[in-house]
Structure formats: C-alpha cells, structure tokens
Amino acid sequence: MYGENVCPNAQQPPDLPALGALMVDAGHGDRVGEFRGVAGARWSLRPVGGGVEWEAEPHLVRPALLIEQLRARTARLNARSRGEVL
C-alpha cells in the first residue's frame, strides 16, 4: 500500500535564512541573534554585533520583526556607549 510508512504530519525543515539575517529563538527566551549557518541539525546564531554563538532548533526560530531588530541593535549600541565589553 502506498504511503503506508509515511507520517502525514511530518514537518518540513524551514528554509535557510540569509547569512546575517536577524532571527528570534523561541527556545532561548525569544533571544535575537544573527543567523551564522547550520551545525548538524541545528542552526547557529550569535548576538547582534558579535559574541558567543549558540545553537537553536530550526523549528523554534523565526525571522525577527522590525521592532525586535531595532530593540536588539539599540541594546547593543547602548551597551557600547556605557563602555561594556561586547
């Protein structure tokens, strides 16, 4: 019988975003990061403007809204203006 072993609710992997695209990782408290590439079955993200990368489950990552992008970039600029090490 055709399709006997096919799972009807299988999720397709999401399309890969462009390198550097800002993404929101729901698996890490809606953390915003730049897409850096694929690491096995996970995606690598890093904080806006640099920092330590983390891995995220692709199905928990979505493109950042404009307001989320603005917030992330503003937070980085504010930290830099306070002299924090980035």
Image: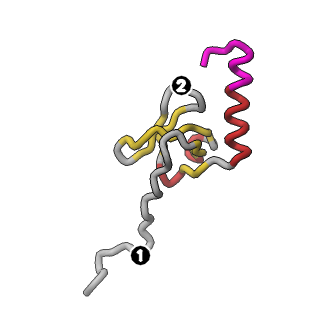
Label 1 crowding class (10 Å Cα cut-off): few <14, some 14-19, many 20+? few
Name which quarter of the figure residue 75 lies in.
top right
Q: What residue type is labelled 1?
A: Pro
Name which quarter of the figure residue 2 lies in.
bottom left
- Front-lying residue, 4 or 34: 34
The residue wearing badge 1 is 8
Q: How many numbered discs, if any?
A: 2
Q: Residue at x 58, y 42 (%)?
A: 22
Q: Residue at x 53, y 25 (%)?
A: 51
Q: Position of residue 7 (x, y in %)?
A: 37, 73
Q: Position of residue 19 (x, y in %)?
A: 48, 42
Q: Where is residue 4 in the image (x, y as percent from the top left)?
A: 29, 80
Image: magenta residue range: 77-86
The residue wearing badge 2 is 51
- Front-lying residue, 27 or 14: 14
Q: Position of residue 27 (x, y in %)?
A: 56, 45
Comparing labels 2 and 1, the label whose residue is closer to the camera: 2
Q: Work out which quarter of the rendered image holds the C terminus and state it.
A: top right
How far apart are labels 2 and 1 at the CA level?
40 Å
Q: In this view, does 56 lie above or below 81?
A: below
Q: Residue at x 44, y 65 (%)?
A: 11
The numbered mark at residue 42 is none
Label 2 crowding class (10 Å Cα cut-off): few <14, some 14-19, many 20+? few
Q: Is mark 1 on a helix, strand or loop?
A: loop
Q: Does the magenta stretch include residue 75?
A: no
Q: Is residue 60 above or below residue 50?
A: below
Q: Which amino acid does label 2 sit on?
A: Gly
Q: Is residue 45 above or below residue 64?
A: above
